[in-house]
Image (cartoon, rainbow, N blue to C red):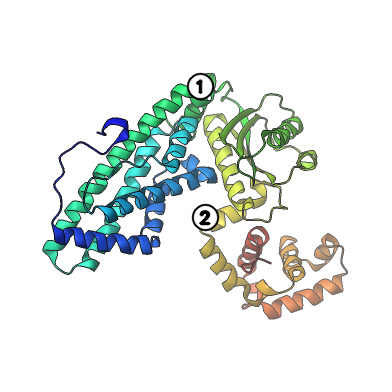
Amino acid sequence: MVGDAFGVSSRYWEPPSERTAELLRSAVEMVLDHPELMYEAMDDASLAAASPAIAAEPALAEAVRACVRANLTHWCLANLASPGMPVAPNLAAENVEIARAVVRHGFDEMLVTNFHAGQNAAIRKWTQLAFFVSPDPYEVRELLDVVMGSIFAFIDDTLAGVFELIQRERRELADVDHTERMETLNLVLGGAPISAGRAGERLRYELDRTHLAAIVWSDSYPAAPEPLEQAVNALAQAAGSVQPLTLVPSPSTLWVWLPTTEVPSLAEVRRAMTAPGVRMAIGSVGAGMAGFRRAHLDAVAAQRLLRRLPSGARLATYDEVEVVALATGGDEERAREFVTRTLGNLISADPELRETVRVYLHEGSNTTRTARALFTHRNTIVHRLDRVRALLPYPLEQRPLQVALALEIVRVLGPADGR
């Protein structure tokens, strides 16, 4: 429960002992001097507990991180000034932005989950820190009683204040229709028990058919809407679809579904994407509500990889990056380790050599077909392959599948040195 105008909780509060206040101030100073002690664990916990839509929208993930870090800093500064005393709820810019995101996306439950996940991660870290600042178990127990009580009260009061901001924002929101559609979309993407008919009625888009999903975004934030809409229109025309479903998860992103049975030719779409920073990730084709979800998740996977490529890479389909998406599983560090172990010195060699062996393996290890595919004389291909074999840590013929996979990962992610 919060006080008037989002003030400090009116619940009874007993001041800590002087020793506990001293220990708390010492621990808070350590956190403020080295915030990374808390940030990483709280970020990971909050994002792990978030809706799948958070992972699909980097701007939302960043808003969650900013909110988590602002709350930690607010609580620490308050306890630095008055250790163990009530902390006023944090209703600064980061939490105001989260309130607006909740209204745009309908993520009420996500907000509670994220706050509590970050809170639990913070308490685990404070437990470790308490034993660091004092070896006395009785002092540690009193310190943790104060810390936990303070954090729980602070989070409850901040959540109450943020939910009041949410209600205000909803009352002022002109686009009620957009809010309802985003709430419905999150039910569908989350696999909630909502019928295709009911969801389609609220989305104004028929779900009992075959869909192609895409994500169109700009590297600028916020972005002008016209270039994004131009890219969507080009895709719709290429697919022969006049009524795509388009929703706006953030000021820099459009989520798109088109009723079509196949990925269209994308040459005209690429030519239409002329605005700087505008990019497009195209998912798979799927049928019904399950296909609707899968098509979008595949677009998310394509977007995640496309974001790692230079800005000149404007468009990618899931088909083009599927092998790498499945192989990396989102763990780029382990994928890089696999590439280094598999390719050895080839990873830093002339890119022409890597492309030659990649095409060679794709062509069934046939030098004649490889030469034809690369418009190069066969003897040149043979010479390049001899150089490749000298650079690989294992004979090429012993590990062709691993080499092919590693080369696909490099093709999409680029070498680790960023060349």
Residue drawn at x 31%, y 48% as measured from the top left: 119
**Is residue 50 visible in the rendered structure shown here?**
yes
Q: Is residue 168 above or below residue 263?
A: above
Place of residue 242 in the rendered image (x, y in percent of width and height, measured from the top left): 71, 24
Residue drawn at x 15%, y 59% as measured from the top left: 18
Pair 2/1: label in front = 1
Q: Say which element carries label 2.
A: loop
Which quarter of the rendering shows the C terminus? bottom right
Residue lying furthest left in this view? 138
The CA distance from mark 2 to mark 1 is 37 Å
Q: Is residue 336 above or below residue 54?
A: below
Residue drawn at x 51%, y 20% as measured from the top left: 197
Q: Is residue 305 above or below residue 387?
A: above
Q: Say which element carries label 1.
A: helix
Place of residue 6 in the rendered image (x, y in percent of width and height, measured from the top left): 31, 34
Q: Residue flagged by tag 2: what amino acid is it?
A: Gly
User: Which circle marks residue 176 in the picture?
Assistant: 1
- Say which quarter of the image contains residue 21: bottom left
**Is residue 37 visible in the rendered structure shown here?**
no
The total of numbered circles placed on residues is 2
Q: Nearer the viewer, residue 192 or 77?
A: 77
Q: Residue flagged by tag 1: what amino acid is it?
A: Val
Which quarter of the rendering shows the N terminus? top left
- Say which quarter of the image contains residue 387: bottom right
Q: Nearer the viewer, residue 146 or 383?
A: 146
Give the residue at mark 2: 329
User: Which circle marks residue 184 in the picture?
Assistant: none
Q: Nearer the viewer, residue 61 or 145?
A: 145
| 180 lies left or right of 147 | right
Place of residue 375 in the rendered image (x, y in percent of width and height, measured from the top left): 87, 62
N-term mark: 2 or 1:
1
